[in-house]
Image (cartoon, grey):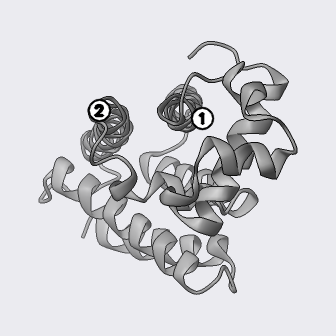
Amino acid sequence: MSTLTKRQEEIIWSAISLIDEKGIQGLTIKNLAARMKFTEAAIYRHFNSKANILTAIIELFKAQTTQIINEKEQSHEESISQLKNIFLRYSGIFSENPAIVSVIFAEEIFQNETSLKEKLTEIIETNEQYFSRLILQGQKAGEIRNDIDPIIAATNLLGSFRLTVKKWKLNGFRYSLKDETVRLTEYFSTILHPL
């Protein structure tokens, strides 16, 4: 991802906020310009289209995801601790910027844009591959039970976290996502721990 200018970052976060409030149909260059008190031409100086803005949003989240995974892969934590901590990092990102949930977990935004779907699929696959590797490492180290399939376990972990985040959003962010994430990771620790 190329480095964003300060103004591009402002546009991206305004776009995220607009999508959160009005849905994807509310994200138009006209609405975005009005929100930011810019002219439409000023928005177009930074992004060629709405699709470019959505791409930048996904790229921003992908860069965050990649950075977190790289940091965790360099750590010397046990596998289950890494699993817990990465979910806590993700819940921290969402807690600090709840509007991003409306973009990252809204497949309908991407269904007609092949390149956006591909980028979102890359994020999902990167997470799935990382969690699968981590579970396999934990199995080899005797930290995680050997009678489960690493890919299926990774999919279950990610799917459960996704549902936890969606429920948090649907409930108007009224409770702590971190607390719910801790409960979820404790549950999975119990399931993954060797018998």
Q: Is residue 107 above or below residue 8?
A: below
Q: Is residue 23 above or below residue 146?
A: below
Q: Which mark is residue 118?
A: 2
Q: In screen coordinates, is 139 left or right of 178?
A: left
Q: Is residue 143 above or below residue 183?
A: above
Residue displayed at 49% across by 58% down: 25
The amino acid on which the numbered mark 2 sits, given as a three-letter code, is: Glu
On the question of residue 128 being in view, the answer is yes
Q: Which mark is residue 17?
A: none
**Secondary structure under the numbered disc 1 in the rendered image:** helix
**Secondary structure under the numbered disc 2 in the rendered image:** helix
Q: Is residue 180 above or below residue 99?
A: below
Alpha-carbon span between mark 1 and mark 2: 17 Å
Q: Which residue is mark 1?
A: 64
Q: Which quadrant, please, contains the N terminus? A: top right
Q: Of the two numbered discs 1 and 2 on the same chain, state the one appearing first in sequence.
A: 1
Residue displayed at 37% across by 35% down: 116
On the image, the x and y values in percent for residue 182 come to 58, 72
> Residue extending furthest top?
2
Residue displayed at 34% across by 55% down: 107
Q: In screen coordinates, is 146 left or right of 156?
A: left
On the image, the x and y values in percent for residue 44 come to 67, 24
The amino acid on which the numbered mark 1 sits, given as a three-letter code, is: Gln
On the question of residue 186 being in view, the answer is no
Query: Image quadrant of residue 162?
Result: bottom left
Residue displayed at 66% across by 57% down: 18
> Badge 1, how many Cα within 10 Å: few under 14, some, many 20+?
some
Residue in front for this viewpoint, 118 or 140: 118
Residue in front for this viewpoint, 46 or 58: 46
